[in-house]
Amino acid sequence: MKVLIVDDDRVLADVLAFTMRRAGFQVIQAFDGEAALQRWAEDRPDLIVLDVNLPKLDGFTVCQRIRERADTPILLLTVRDEEDDIVHGLELGADDYITKPFSPRQLVARGHSVLRRAGKMPAPAIRQVSDLALDPSRREMRIGQGEAISLTPLETRLLDYLMLNAGHVLTNEAIIEHVWGYEGGDRDMLRQLVHRLRSKIAEACRPPEADESSPPHPGYIETVPGLGYGLISPHSVD
Amino acid sequence: MKVLIVDDDRVLADVLAFTMRRAGFQVIQAFDGEAALQRWAEDRPDLIVLDVNLPKLDGFTVCQRIRERADTPILLLTVRDEEDDIVHGLELGADDYITKPFSPRQLVARGHSVLRRAGKMPAPAIRQVSDLALDPSRREMRIGQGEAISLTPLETRLLDYLMLNAGHVLTNEAIIEHVWGYEGGDRDMLRQLVHRLRSKIAEACRPPEADESSPPHPGYIETVPGLGYGLISPHSVD
DNA sequence: CCTTTTTGTCACAGCTTTGTCACAACTTAG
DNA sequence: CTAAGTTGTGACAAAGCTGTGACAAAAAGG
């Protein structure tokens, strides 16, 4: 399930992107009206979160252009109290709106709501980071078109957290808190879990006809000594 | 620069965490009042973002407990229009507040503001001095478009301090104090560390196709005999 | 209930970081 | 100019961190 986030405010755009990504959407971003139309045409998102104040082509025009050609659900992003914007946008074909400052829960809920009305039941949340896919509800991981690999509950939590924060290094403390929570965990436990998860990722990378003794694929999970771990992928070197 | 995020709403907590991480903070999370106190005691964060409605121990009590023992800056998270909460929290020692729904920019700005008032200048996410870039959250250094070079904790501290004071000579004593702090350090240790850092900078300067025995590039770290060291760059000689 | 899976704990090997020391080269002071 | 002090460099050992495997206990599943 793809969402296109359009906002020229980079900070807000990234936070919106994270919020949707956390909810299981694949996120595409555009930072101006023209790019938005292009990304929409190329990527065919299932949902659009669209700011009205954009450079190059304003959000209303983008909304109108898209609506003329498709019924892609559109959530407008407006500043609080700009009622004229809301009415105008809804008339142009937007499906709903979100005001800034925004509540993450409300954003996700409204996204789901407009998708439901558009007859698109959101698929179960699948986390995707380049070729790595995780289905938390099934506790399965897959790389590209490879076999699905079952994960244990703790492995699932760890991988989910790493994927959600892909590109960042997460401290050991943060990971332990997230994975073990109230029960508490420690460095040894984390190390063992990381080892197990890495083995499963290596297994997922292994072509079915490969020799058992073939060297494991260069890893997705990166260690920063004395600090923690982060998720990279072989394709994120760009 | 560490921030402790305390909120029992997992969605909001994760979005808050992402926002602060994006701004360059190291993030620690707690989901109830007791865990917050524990994390505070163990991890010594520079800043606390604290929801008032928490299980086990409410945010006001947490705020009060921490304030009795330390001057760690505290940002309260409150629901819009709960003015009583705001006043009560400020009286207990909170430094500022953020209302939900929140604006990411405002959160980061208020965080920076209370840190500044507490005399702690926040580090930028990526420190840049001409073509030299340091990402403290990953402990990586890069020159121009070259390969990222991993640094050790002490190397990171030294380079960060030098970059922060680029163009100035820092005395040996000042550097030792900054890098080793309470544990203390000495001239020998500094000399060895400088040597190591210079080697890594030389490595970062080395074109990938260069001969292993090619002479190291003229350095970025300048020695002032009898005084200390400073950061210059090849491009600052003009 | 029994079997299988998951998780925690421990041990050990390998790797990385840091401190200490020695020595050569350079700089400064008399 | 010489002697003393400072700085750069390399080597090595100690300490700490990380990866790995084994096994037992706990949990889950049939």
Image (cartoon, coloured by chain):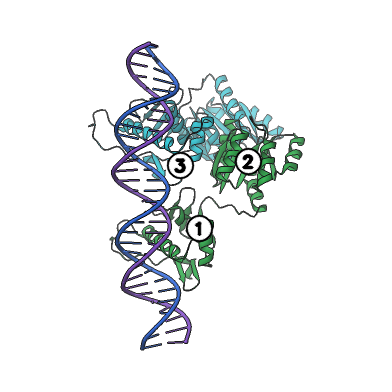
Chain colours: A cyan, B green, C purple, D blue
Q: Is residue A15 visible?
A: no
Q: Amino acid at mark 2?
A: Val
What's the CA distance linking mark 2 and mark 3?
23 Å
Return the residue at label 1: B180
Q: Mark 2 or mark 3, which is nearer to you?
A: 2
Q: Amino acid at mark 3?
A: Gly
Q: Is B123 situated left or right of B212 in this image?
A: right
CA neighbours of label 1 inside 10 A, class few (<14), some (14 to 19), many (20+): some
Return the residue at label 2: B49
The quadrant of the picture occupied by the C terminus of chain A is top left
Q: Residue at x 46, y 68 (%)?
A: B222
Q: Nearer the viewer, residue B168 or A153?
A: A153
Chain under callout 1: B
Report whether mark 1 lies on the same chain as mark 3.
Answer: no
Chain under callout 3: A
Q: Is residue A72 above or below residue A15?
A: above
Horizontal and vertical percent for residue A7? 57, 39
Q: Residue at x 46, y 58 (%)?
A: B132
Q: Mark 1 or mark 3, which is nearer to you?
A: 1
Secondary structure under the numbered disc 3 in the rendered image: loop
Report whether mark 2 lies on the same chain as mark 3.
Answer: no
Q: Amino acid at mark 1?
A: Trp
Horizontal and vertical percent for residue B196? 39, 60
